[in-house]
Image (cartoon, rainbow, N blue to C red):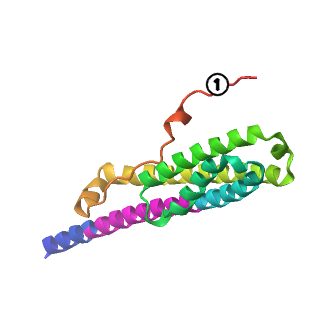
Amino acid sequence: MWLLYVIIGIVVIFLLWLAGGYNSLQTGKIKVEEAESGIDVALTKRFDVLTKMIEVVKGYAKHEQETLEKVISLRNQVHLNSASIQEKQQIVTQMDQAMRAINVVVEQYPDLKANDNFKHLQVTIADVEEHLQAARRVYNANVSSYNQKVQLFPSNIIANMFHFTTRQFFEAEEFKRKDVEMKF
């Protein structure tokens, strides 16, 4: 009889460990998905602000239509909810390129830089970029924590049993990894 209680106790402890490990992995997975949603929110806000900036720039740079149309087209193509993290990284890269192109247009029109609406947009863009960076940091922190649970013993046993897989980090674009050259 005593042996039966020991076996039942071991089974109960194992089931509790299994349930706890599974719930921990599920929680990590949900946090990663929530953080990815935060990136989506920041990207959507970025696109909205960029679209407004385009409207201001359009008034000053009608002949720069190609750059502006490319940004608008990119804005209209984005379907963040269905995009993978890799696709979101590509979208961010394309939007960064578009932002650089708009900044070139702005340099050609000194009056635009003095425009109050444009100044406000610049402040808003800085704020949006900071929120996007924060969303990326939260996402990567959650991915790190989740990936540790998936890969480290003993939770990796449960992860393998229930087919949990590691997630990819949101990485910086290649041009942002280079040293910034400052010319005065």
Q: Is residue 181 positioned above or below 1 on the image?
A: above
Please state if 10 lies on the left or on the right of 128 as rendered: left
Q: Amino acid at mark 1?
A: Glu
State the quadrant of the C terminus: top right
Residue lying at the far bottom in this picture: please name it: 1
Please state if 82 lies on the left or on the right of 72 as rendered: left
Which quarter of the picture shows residue 160?
bottom left
Q: Please name whichever residue, 37 or 178, is drawn nearer the observer in this view of the structure.
A: 178
| Residue pictured at 66% horizontal, 55% vertical | 50
Residue lying at the far front in this picture: please name it: 63
Horizontal and vertical percent position of residue 64 = 67, 46
Horizontal and vertical percent position of residue 48 = 65, 61
Q: Residues within 10 Å of mark 1 (few under 14, many from 20)?
A: few
| Residue pictured at 29% horizontal, 50% vertical | 153
Q: Please name whichever residue, 90 or 107, is drawn nearer the observer in this view of the structure.
A: 107
State the quadrant of the N terminus: bottom left
- Please name the predominant secondary structure of the magenta segment in the image: helix
Residue labelled with disc 1? 181
Highlighted magenta segment, given as a residue range: 15-41
In the rendered image, residue 39 lying in the magenta stretch gets the answer yes
| Residue pictured at 82% horizontal, 40% vertical | 110
Q: Please name whichever residue, 54 or 1, is drawn nearer the observer in this view of the structure.
A: 54
Please state if 23 lies on the left or on the right of 15 as rendered: right
Horizontal and vertical percent position of residue 26 = 38, 65
Q: Is residue 123 positioned above or below 3 on the image?
A: above
Please state if 74 lies on the left or on the right of 118 as rendered: left
Q: How many marks?
A: 1
In the rendered image, residue 55 lying in the magenta stretch gets the answer no
Which quarter of the picture shows residue 100?
top right
| Residue pictured at 27% horizontal, 67% vertical | 13
Horizontal and vertical percent position of residue 162 = 26, 64
Q: Secondary structure at mark 1?
A: loop
